[in-house]
Amino acid sequence: MTEETNESLQKPLDKMTVKELREVALELPEITGVHGMNKAELLAEIKKVKGIVEEPVHEHSETVVKVKSRIKAFKVKRATALQDKDARMASIYRRRISRLKKKSRKVA
């Protein structure tokens, strides 16, 4: 084996490029049609042959409705902070609202 192959074996399968995955798949005689596969297919076949169980990805625990209700609550707090001329807290609430908006886009 060359040094490149040793380095690629140390890298996790999910982080490998398609080219590296093809090299690994070509070394496994159980896999055929390597050059016609995309990255997802190569990963699935290599994991199946090597007996690697794929762990399920955790879904987002919050729903869009919950996130948006938290945004509304922070908007009320920000409005009161602006009325009280508390610029520091208004800025903190603005950043929290922004983060929650990003989170709602991911959850959706």
Image (spheres, rainbow, N blue to C red):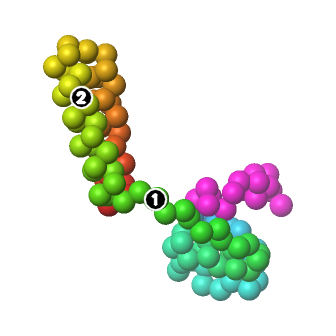
- Helix, strand or loop at label 2? It is helix
Position above or below: 26 against 100 = below
Magenta-colored stretch includes residue 52: no
Where residue 21 appears, as percent x and y from the top left, is: 64, 66
- Helix, strand or loop at label 1? It is loop
- Dot 2 or dot 1: first in sequence order is 1
| Left or right of 21 in this view: 84 | left
In this rendered view, identify the residue nearer to me: 15 or 8: 15
Residue 25, visible in the rendered structure:
no
Residue density around tag 2, few if under 14, some if 14–19, many if 20 or more, within 10 Å: many
Residue at 35% of width from left, 39% of height from top? Answer: 99
| Left or right of 94 in this view: 47 | right
In this rendered view, identify the residue nearer to me: 87 or 14: 87
**Quarter where residue 83 is shown:** top left
Where are the magenta residues, as a range?
1-17
Magenta-colored stretch includes residue 10: yes
Residue at 70% of width from left, 80% of height from top? Answer: 48
Where residue 72 appears, as percent x and y from the top left, is: 24, 43
Q: Nearer the viewer, mark 2 or mark 1?
A: 2
Where residue 16 appears, as percent x and y from the top left, is: 62, 58
Q: Which residue is mark 1?
A: 60
| Left or right of 60 in this view: 68 | left
The secondary structure that most of the magenta stretch takes on is helix
Q: What amino acid type is highlighted by mark number 2?
A: Arg
Q: What amino acid type is highlighted by mark number 1?
A: His
Q: Which residue is mark 2?
A: 78
